[in-house]
Amino acid sequence: MADKIFRVNMSDLSAKVEAVPEGWMGLGGRGLTSTIVAAEVKPTCHPLGKNNKLVFAPGLLSGTQAANSGRLSCGAKSPLTGTIKESNAGGTSAQMLAKLGVKALIIEGLPADAGKWYSLHLTADGVTIAEETEVIGQGNFAVVQTLNQRLGDKVGVITIGPAGEMKMLGANISIKDPDNHLRSHGRGGLGAVMGSKRIKFISVAPTDQKVAIADPEAFKVAGRTFAKALIDNPISKALGQYGTNVLVNIINESGGLPTRNFTSGQFAGHEAISGETMYDTIVARGGKPKHNCHPGCVINCSQIYADAKGHYKTSGFEYESIWALGADCCVDNLDHIAEADNIMDDLGIDSIETAVAFGVAMEAGVLQFGDGAEVCRMLREEVGKGTPLGRILGNGAGSVGRAYGVTRVPVVKNQAIPAYDPRAIKGIGITYATSTQGADHTMGYTIATNILGVGGKVDPLSKEGQVELSRNLQIATAAIDSTGMCLFVAFAALDDATCLPALIDLLNARYGIHLVADDVTNLGMSILKTERAFNLAAGFTNKDDRLPEFFLEEPIAPHNVVWDISDEAIDSFWNF
Amino acid sequence: MQLTVKLFAYFRDNRFKEQLADYPEGTTVEDIIRSLGIKPDEVGVTMINSRHCSLEKVPAPGDQLAIFPMIGGG
């Protein structure tokens, strides 16, 4: 069955299934969401108004047996940054959508009756729009539970929590994972866009359909090589044991762990929040150190973190969330951090943006650094209930800075800078500055080469080579984000010569095409240029590709370095 | 010379987190790694005083040496 575009118009509550335009045929994931947003969304539109569109697209390999191919892309104009946005998540929906033949789901318009909420239900035949009342106001965990009862355990769920309903700019979109917990399209406030369209959830019907494979034998051979490259990679082993939180100690050791709202590069409490401590705690309490965010993942970087009584507390407990609440807010207690992470999952709010917002609020004196219990209370009582303070926090780090007159506000294009200080790890500063989507480490993860020794070595404290490093990684990332592959395949792809050719063979066998490595690079470049063109048309200039002033003026310990890469060097990023 | 050696991730298993120890002058990072029963090709990153260093590097007295296996995340 040929893939189709599923299009929903919330203005007249209609839905249709369309043929895939020729130009979109070879695209998936981020390449497709960004192409659709660039083609159909007016760049100057209000992100929460009728002219924005919310687009979901599984990757080119999603729905197949290829390892780690179950990532879903979600795109729109971001209400947080005002730029184009693609946010990428695991969970079960990408594979289900691909099997239903959904190349992309495009949601446009706004309902005439702003008092009503709706749901969308996707089957192979199309989309049903229904008014929803039962789960309105509920947290994401309750939504998943209710829908499992209403539609059966195997249903796919894409949902917003109260933060999305309240159109907070930090609101995310959550995806049900294989254990009925949540993965998130975390960054850029896409949950607010879904909330603006008055859609509480999208359910995806389970199916026995399979995606068509043009050359099944070649696909099987390439799939084995690809999976072996992932499994054999030593980084996969550490990710399976410690999760991404294995990074706390090495980033702290490097002096690049932003601490106390970005005033130091090392955190005295690093050991208490480290991946090593987390692993020991999980094992002692009977949690699960290894867990997959989507079926077919062979890395298993997720985990089930249990509380002191051995009950589920949170999963997908990521380094960046733990860093933000831990080092940046000086909370040296993993249980408080896990509690906050769980509340943020339930409210449906980005755990990077919101936790960095708390760091700024602590600097403003709204609460004390280190007060994890108060963070949890404010999440529940202020953010969760939409009080004025809760909305200031829920609108992100920039919002808190503006409301309280704080000048040390770590954002680029109004999106919070994550867990790596650009003064001490300069490559990532180029990524933060030039990313088409505001500060986002995943856009071009120079940490691999600056710190981890993956894909070569570039001294994190030197100005040399950082632009080129970030450019090459941003191009490669845009391509990987189009395949439906988890970005962590890059660790194998950067150092194992069998990995990338096998990935290209998978694409060729799936579609009966003949891509070579240059085609993949060209795809990445073309995605970045499409996204950049949207931003320029929305009013951004190279002057927006800059880090906040304080990074240039405040040296950070222990290396006592400032951000010192010139504007001209930053702008040369786009010379390709 | 006295050095502080710090181990991370599974390198800590049956070893230690952090140890102050005496090494002969001229000891290289690789010598220290081998003395701990760690194979050099399992090592991902080494840092002395928060700066990356090569396996051939000879630490100075009082240095802090951090030894990591190959790790990643993000």
Image (spheres, coloured by chain):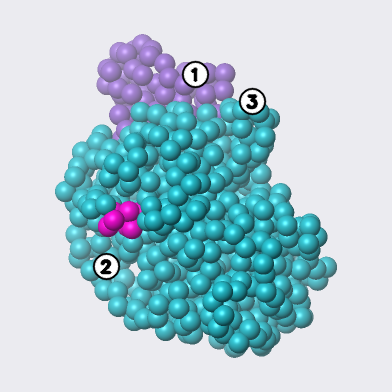
Residues beneath discs 3 and 1 located on the same chain? no
From the image, state whether disc 3 or disc 1 is nearer to you.
Answer: 3
Q: CA distance from mark 1 to mark 2?
A: 47 Å
Q: Residue at x 32, y 47 (%)?
A: A360
Q: Which residue bears the numbered disc 1? A: B16
Q: Which residue bears the numbered disc 3? A: A284
In the rendered image, the vertical position of residue A35 relative to residue A568, given as above or below:
below
Q: Is residue A444 visible?
A: no
Locate residue A221 relative to residue B67 in the image: left or right.
right
The quadrant in which residue A23 appears is bottom right
Q: Is residue A199 visible?
A: yes
Q: Which chain is purple?
A: B
From the image, state whether disc 1 or disc 2 is nearer to you.
Answer: 2
Q: Colour of chain A?
A: cyan
Q: The residue tagged with tag 2: helix, strand or loop?
A: helix
Q: Which residue bears the numbered disc 2? A: A544
Residue under mark 3: which chain is it in? A
Q: Position of residue B34 (x, y in %)?
A: 48, 22
Q: The residue tagged with tag 3: helix, strand or loop?
A: helix
Locate residue A520 relative to residue A355 in the image: left or right.
right
The stretch in magenta equals A397-403
- In the picture, which quadrant includes the N terminus of chain A? bottom right
Residue under mark 1: which chain is it in? B
